[in-house]
Amino acid sequence: MEPRRQFIVGLAAIVAAAAMAACGNSDSLTVPDDGTGASGATGGDYSAPAAAPSAADDTPPPGVDDNAAKVYFVQNVYPALMVTCGSCHVAPGNNGAPAWLSSASASDAYTMIEARGYINLTSSLLLKKGAHEGPALTPDETNGITQWLTLEMQVRGNATPANLLAKLGDCLDKTKFDTIALDKLRTTPRTNENTDRCTGCNKAYCQTCHEQGEYTMYSNDGTLGTSTFDALASNMTSSDGTFLIEKYITTNGTTLVPSTAISDKSAVTQTGPAYSHPMFLVDDTMKAAILDFANDAITKYNAKSCGQ
């Protein structure tokens, strides 16, 4: 049966919970097992040790005279984020998770968050993300982050920093992207999976579950809808505001670096439980093509020949 039709038939034949287990609420990160055999937002230890105070913690960012917002972040927001988000998002990131926290200093974490465009009261992914493969913020954490971002708007005069990843669309090379051959990547059933029960696990293309950027991954051959490359080139985001390019390029502090999110996710699926995110294999050729595509775009951006 043709993969797209197989997905539709399978979806009609099984309960919604099984469908969600098959495609998975899956972005690039993976967190500790919750004790049930599958990663989730309800269990596990997500904390990482916060850094000791440093002299730089009281220094406002360039172009900002008032340090009130940064001090509030250091004293109130940073410790909370390290508890709720630290185990996945402390640099270099756990299993491909975006790295936007630092165990070296709160000031370093602040700079990393700023570079990702999260200092924005109306669109910050810190507030919009919600429960994913890690937990949602608590109400107190949400209130604290909202108070911090409100202060940022006051001291910055609403001049919020842009996300570096929002600037890369015209840096991308289609020929190098096509070499990745994402449109040919297919799932492989696990030995303990019944292919008549699973959704999208039996030689299905990635777009079976990710045709419109579901779960922050975008895979579309362009037959119906926007092609993957065109989506990346137009700086598209997923529904939660994550830039789709992040599967290929991410940030380390204020520096653009190649992302290993796709190959990391592949590695996770190879040890995942039956009927979780379908298993897929990324070989060395694809890894090299992703790296070449990312490095080419980063080199052009750093040379200021695009993305300015």
Image (spheres, grey):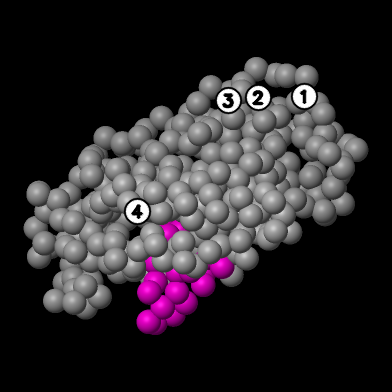
Callout in the foreground (4, 1):
4
Mark 4 lies on a secondary structure that is helix
Q: Which mark is residue 56?
A: 1
Kind of residue at badge 3: Ser
> Do the CB atoms of the residues marked 2 and 1 lie less than 8 Å apart?
yes
Q: Secondary structure at mark 2?
A: loop
Q: Is residue 167 above or below residue 110?
A: below
Mark positioned earlier in the residue sequence (1 or 3): 1
Which residue corresponds to the image point at 18% horizontal and 77% vertical from the top-left? 2
**SS class of the residue under badge 3?**
loop
Callout 4: few (<14), some (14-19), or many (20+) C-alpha neighbours within 10 Å? some
Whether label 4 touches label 1, CB < 8 Å: no
Above or below: residue 201 compared with residue 55: below
Say what amino acid the circle numbered 4 marks. Answer: Met
| Disc nearer the start of the sequence (3/4) | 3
Q: Is residue 19 visible?
A: no
Q: Which residue is mark 3?
A: 103
- Residue 9 colored magenta? no
Measure the alpha-carbon separation of dots 1 and 3.
Answer: 14 Å
Of the residues under marks 4 and 1, which one precedes in the sequence? 1
* Residue 107 screen position, x and y as percent: 71, 29
Q: Would you say 66 lies left or right of 103 here?
A: right
The residue sitting at 47% across, 77% down in the picture is: 226
Range covered by the magenta-colored residues: 213-233
Q: Which mark is residue 105?
A: 2
Query: What residue is shown with label 4?
Result: 286
Mark closer to the chain start, 4 or 2: 2
* Position in image of residue 199 (x %, y %): 21, 64
Amino acid marked by disc 1: Ala
Query: Real-space Cα distance between discs 2 and 1?
Result: 9 Å
